[in-house]
Amino acid sequence: MTTPDGSGRGTGLTGAAVGRPAGAPALPPPLPGALAHAAGGPRYWLPTGADRTSAPAAPATAPPVAPAGGFDVEAVRRDFPQLHREVNGRPLVWLDNGATTLKPRQVIEAVGEHYAAGTSNVHRGAHTLAKQATEIYEEGRAEAAKVLGAPDPDGIVFVRGTTEAVNLVAQTWGRANLGVGDEILVSAAEHHSNLVPWQLIAKERRARVVPIPLLPDGQLDQDAYRDRLGFRTKLVALTHASNVLGTVPPVAEMTALAHRYGARVLVDGAQAVAHFPVDVTALDADFYAFSGHKVFAPTGIGALYGKRELLEAMPPWQGGGNMIDSVSFEETRYAPVPHRLEAGTGHIGGVAGLRAALRYLTGLDRQAATAYEEQLTGYALAALRTVPGLRLLGEAPGRIGVFTFLLAGTDPIALAGALDRQGIAVRAGHHCAQPALAAYGLQSAARASLALYNTVQDVDALVAALRGVQAEGAAA
């Protein structure tokens, strides 16, 4: 039997043993130690009487409600060839979108066209193909700025992905601005990509990484955040959507608080951009990063947005071609941003695919697509709660369609394998977010994650498979 801390060890205490009258409602499970700070008390950002730490959970038997019409998911699915293959003799049900999204034919064709007919390096070339490739490359930058609501395409730096974007900021802005005793606040919901780079630079600069803890429902503890902010805080690193809990923190409000102390804010948008519209201007984020492969584009390409004055003040991270204006043994002068931060030949084919992916995304009715995903997420939550023995992590309101869970009596890796045999792709492990799992007393869990091409039928297939695995385990 799995205990609330996921260890599988019983406490040896029954309700009667701790003085609970016979027939009284079951006591809630004890909080893991990492969440003990949130055992009670008011939450300043919630209305009076709306403290979510004591609010009742939704009934486990609440019937799922299918998404309403208005978004043509079947038309979208026709654009994704991989959705129409079989795995282990079953139609593929792709629920591993948190790890990577599938690619529409428009992206596949754009990448193929680049290598089949448009191969060239970019910038400085005098021939036709160089000019054409450069035009596509810079259009990709403009599309990234458009998707993020950035005021200027020159505020977009191409990187390999969110990981490289965070490392770039840590190694340039961080090295120039962090000193002894300075603090970097990092939420406990972060992917390792938005934690480890800050640990590395903090050790070098003799600064400190300070965690922003979680509440039991998966929200960031805003009272603790307010308490830990101070004039030693130089940077706050936040996810825009958790890859484990699905939580969407109040980034704009948290950014405004950080700015009151003169701190900068970096937002990891890897799990956000594909799910809902993003506006870095409205968020007032100082830095914002996302990965192409999680927004229907190729792997190996992503974008970092930075406020122009910050990018211009950052020293180069890498030296070489493309990032210079002039070079001599006496002096090297650097190119203006963003090129100063893009040493060497970039992933030109990747940018062609990113341009196509972002155009595909913005060509959809984003409002309808976001509403559809929200409704499908609600349907999935209600459906998963009907599975006996399933423990879902996080109950934060306004979450994206990321569901990390345990099934009683089943190892997460073995569970993912059993689902795969039925053609259902989910992920299992620590999800590169070990502090988030550790807050719940866990080292591993299974995760299903939605995208705008998933359907009610996908959710039903997952739930039926989970019920089958659970029944087999009970019989065994």
Image: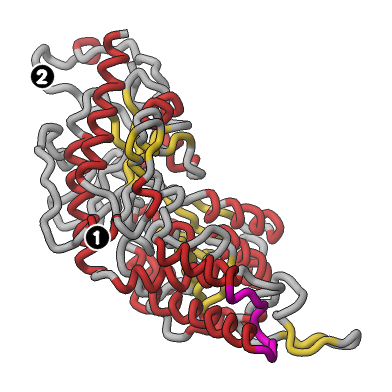
**Residue 130, quarter of picture:** bottom right
Residue count near mark 1 (Cα–Cα under 10 Å), binned few <14, some 14–19, many ≥20: few
Looking at this view, name the residue that lies furthest to the right.
329
Q: Give how far across and how far down residue 246 sits, in percent.
A: 33, 49
**Residue 93, quarter of picture:** top left
Query: Which residue occupies 59% across, 57% down?
Result: 198
Earlier sequence position, callout 1 versus callout 2: 2
Residue count near mark 2 (Cα–Cα under 10 Å), binned few <14, some 14–19, many ≥20: few
Q: Is residue 36 visible?
A: no
Q: Depth check: 319 or 415 in front? A: 415
Residue designated by label 1: 75
Q: Give how far across and how far down residue 278 sits, in percent.
A: 35, 70
Give amino acid for label 2: Ala
Give amino acid for label 1: Ala
Q: Does residue 330 appear to the left or right of 44 in the view shown?
A: right
Q: Depth check: 297 or 245 in front? A: 297
Residue designated by label 2: 24
Secondary structure of the residue carrying tag 1 is: helix
